[in-house]
Amino acid sequence: MSKTVEFFFDFGSPTAYLAWTQLPKIAAATGATIVWRPLLLGGVFKATGNQSPAAIAAKGRYMNHDLARFARRYGVPLRFNPYFPINTLMLMRGAAGYQDDPRFHAYLTTIFQAMWVDEKPMGRPEVVAEVLAAAGFDAAEFERLINDETVKERLKASTEEAIARGVFGAPSFFVDGELYFGQDRLDFIAEALAK
């Protein structure tokens, strides 16, 4: 029986973007299944008292340098979004709404690309609508989706569950009930999935 890795993520995290570029390869190599778990990082921060590394100037400068190192190691593009921090509520509701839709992975690609490669101001509804339309999504459908009470509740429940399980930031992963935090722990996740 193959293992699963739960991936709690928010588009507002550049480390979640980096993890997203690598986790599918790890899952494929180990025969594991990814369980995609959108959450609202702002809600996690509020509940746990945590904050973005960018809130501490020296840590933020180091983190930007470190992110560039990992992007080079992974061979993926990464441009720090000049509009950071971005309110990702509508983006994460979109992830929760498309989670069971065949277009889910196209949505992830579209939003992560816009955030961490194309440097778009993705907190602006008109920009989100343009980005989604260019990727073949219907902006009116997206608007309905993110305002659906079931979708809102799904994102809220996922966020609350993450907090209850000890999550304090994103990306966070669970393998065999064990929490791993940060994209720089992907080697431990690969080991756990290979056991």
Image: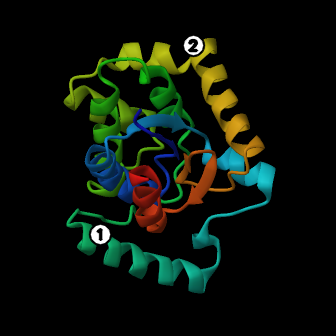
Q: Given this view, does label 1 or label 2 mark the residue nearer the observer?
A: 1
Residue at x-position 61% and y-position 41%: 40
Q: Which amino acid is tagged 1? A: Ala
Residue 83 appears in view: no
Question: Where is residue 124 drawn, in percent x and y?
Answer: 45, 40
Give the residue pinned by disc 1.
71
Looking at the image, is 140 positioned above or below residue 182? Answer: above
* Residue density around tag 1, few if under 14, some if 14–19, many if 20 or more, within 10 Å: some
Looking at the image, is 13 positioned above or below residue 74? Answer: above
Give the residue pinned by disc 2.
148
Q: Earlier in the sequence, mark 1 or mark 2?
A: 1
Residue at x-position 78% and y-position 55%: 48
Looking at the image, is 158 positioned above or below residue 44? Answer: above
Q: Nearer the viewer, residue 69 or 135?
A: 69
Per the model, the C-alpha gap separating discs 1 and 2 is: 36 Å
Q: Nearer the viewer, residue 117 or 194?
A: 194
Residue at x-position 62% and y-position 52%: 178
Question: Where is residue 115 drawn, in percent x and y?
Answer: 36, 51
Q: Secondary structure at mark 2?
A: loop
Question: Where is residue 65 drawn, in percent x and y?
Answer: 40, 81
